[in-house]
Amino acid sequence: MVDVTGHFGMALLFAAPAWFVWGRRGALGFTAFALVTAMLPDSDLVLQQVLPITHHGVTHTLLFVVLLSTLGGFVAARWLTDYFNTHSRIRSTDIASETVFVFATTGLLVGGTSHLFADVLSAPDIAPPLSPFWPFYPEPVIVDVIYYDSPLWNFGLIGVALAVHLVLARHEGVPLETRYRIGNREDSEALGAK
């Protein structure tokens, strides 16, 4: 596992394609959702105080990340849809709760998955290897190319990720045309007509 800095760097790298999918404002929100769950699998360090679980156990699986990301998406859709539709900075008058669910769930999933990926690259150094595909494939997955305490990897990951986001932020691309695009009412109506 990389340290916290490395995990945030990996989450930023995983979230970078959001600039092409969601556009400038959407990418910032999407990246925020990804950063929220960048450390989610390490919740086992707190939970093991009250539950009989181990580090790199059940919380370090895709199943756990998918379940909690989906739950987080439902919560976001329930509580944020009205906020997005009334907040003037979003520049939209009609964002469906389905769009908020897809947006939030995907962002949360990207952050949690980035954590698992970083741990697969570095787990055997100071912690047991993880089995990210449990219960479907219970064997550990080990790549072991990153050393935990390596400043080069940890600060390098976040440095490269921030540089990528800064370059993409200056790019004036148009987000993909999808049914979940966050735009103004005219954009949504035009997409619905296609």
Image (tube, rainbow, N blue to C red):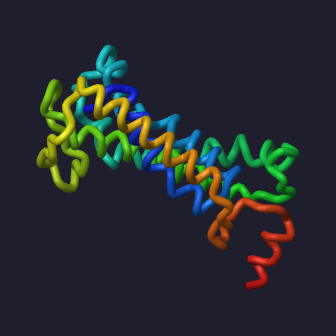
Query: What x and y, as percent, mark residue 116?
Result: 31, 42
Q: Quadrant of the N terminus?
A: top left
Residue 107 shown left or right of residue 170 in the figure? left
Query: What x and y, as percent, mark residue 111?
Result: 45, 43
Q: Quadrant of residue 65?
A: top left
Viewer-closest of 191 and 173: 173
Q: Is residue 28 above or below residue 188?
A: above
Furthest residue to the bottom?
194
Q: Is residue 73 visible?
A: no
Q: Which residue is at a point 78% across and 83% down the rendered structure image?
A: 193
Q: Which residue is at a point 56% across and 44% down the rendered structure image?
A: 31
Q: Quadrant of the C terminus?
A: bottom right
Q: Which residue is at a point 52% across and 35% down the rendered structure image?
A: 36
Viewer-closest of 163 and 35: 163
Query: What x and y, as percent, mark residue 42?
Result: 34, 28
Residue 20 shown left or right of residue 40 in the figure? right
